[in-house]
Image (cartoon, grey):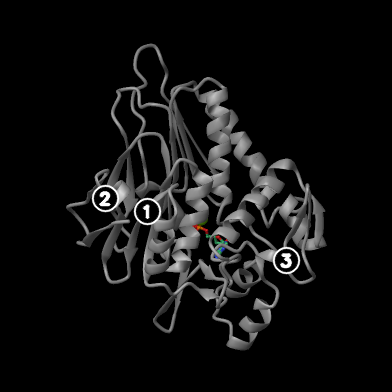
Amino acid sequence: MKLHRLAAAAAAAVMLTGCGGEQQTSQYTMFAMDTCVTLSGCCDRQTLENAGKEITRLEKLWSVNIKGSDIYRLDHEGSAKLSDETAELLRYSLSISERTDGALDPTVFPLLKEWGFTTDEHHVPDSERISELLKNTGWQRLKLDGNRASLPEGMAVDTGAVAKGYAADIIAEKLRADGVSAGIIDLGGNVLTFGEKPDGSSWKISVRDPFGKGTAGTLSLGECSVVTSGSYERCFEQDGIRYHHIIDPATGRPADSGLESVTVIADESRLCDALSTALFVMGEDKAFDFWRESRDFEMIMITSDKRLLISEGIADKFEQSRKGTSYTAEVISR
Ligand code: ADP
Ligand code: MG
């Protein structure tokens, strides 16, 4: 599974080459938040290493597996006093749950566990079991009062759909505060670029081809974040059917929305991360309706029948790959 995620990270790679003048260009790679993290910046390596420590600190607050993390305590004790960062992360997740009418729901965790996505011991639960577990979900039942969070018995949360994006925003802020003029934060393909590229050109961020090993195309952008949720990320096959890790909170099953991937482009990585998951659950029609009502993001969807749908605000910044899968591209207008 880890290797798979490393491959995904490599495909989404964005490069920082040469900071120009006297400035040093550095890169630092580590494993955190269950993925390969690469930090690049116009600074010395130590500055990036310090930022890496910050990611590890956040992971220790947010991991569902690390004993004593804020989320672990909440899940096991039903109530916990959280650090400011965790309370803000949960508050943010809930705001997106509300905005997406529950397509993003951090309380689907009991279902993820049942399907085996947390342990890689996958299995397809029967319908009764799913119905039973669905009773233990519902984002409205996660209560947050200041830094105190509580959950009804049997419920549990996981912040996997938003944590990497949220962390990327925090790290970008830290690096800027440390005086880094430009850089890239790449958490397993969850990309954020900040500052101006030293040579004045735009940042080039590739979008993975879900049907092949290469890229479906490349975005040329100013500072921004680009995050993709894909059905190929963590999945297993049984009886010829592929099951993946994005759960539709309405059915308790992997979202069967006719999509292979959803890429969201926005200023903030937390928004990209939260929406890429939620829009994947919604499927093409609902997601584009949602986009039409919004003004804070753009998106690219790749459907199971090999169409590439791109929102008009980003269409002229995207160049489709000539190699690999041939998609029928369609620009979606407001
Ligand atoms: P990745 O973590 O692979 O980058 P996503 O950002 O799409 O992908 O997040 C998927 C993760 O979010 C799952 O592994 C799980 O932890 C959690 N999750 C799955 N379905 C939902 C959902 N509908 N709402 C909120 N979180 C979800
Ligand atoms: Mg996400």
> Number of marks in the image?
3
- Which residue is painted at 56% across and 35% down in the image? 171
Residue receiving disc 3: 141
Residue 165: x %, y % from top left: 53, 46
Is 11 or 90 nearer to us in this picture?
Answer: 90
Return the disc, 2 or 1, that comes first in the chain's sequence: 2
Q: Residue furthest left?
A: 322
- Amino acid type for the residue under numbered disc 3: Arg
Ligand 1 closer than 8 Å to label 3 CB: no
**How far apart are the alpha carbons under marks 3 and 1?**
30 Å
Q: Which residue is mark 1?
A: 299
Q: Could you tell me if residue 1 is visible in this image?
A: no
Of mark 3 and mark 2, the one earlier in the sequence is 3
- What secondary structure is marked by label 3? helix
Mark 2 or 1, closer to the camera: 1
The answer to whether one can see residue 268 in this image is yes
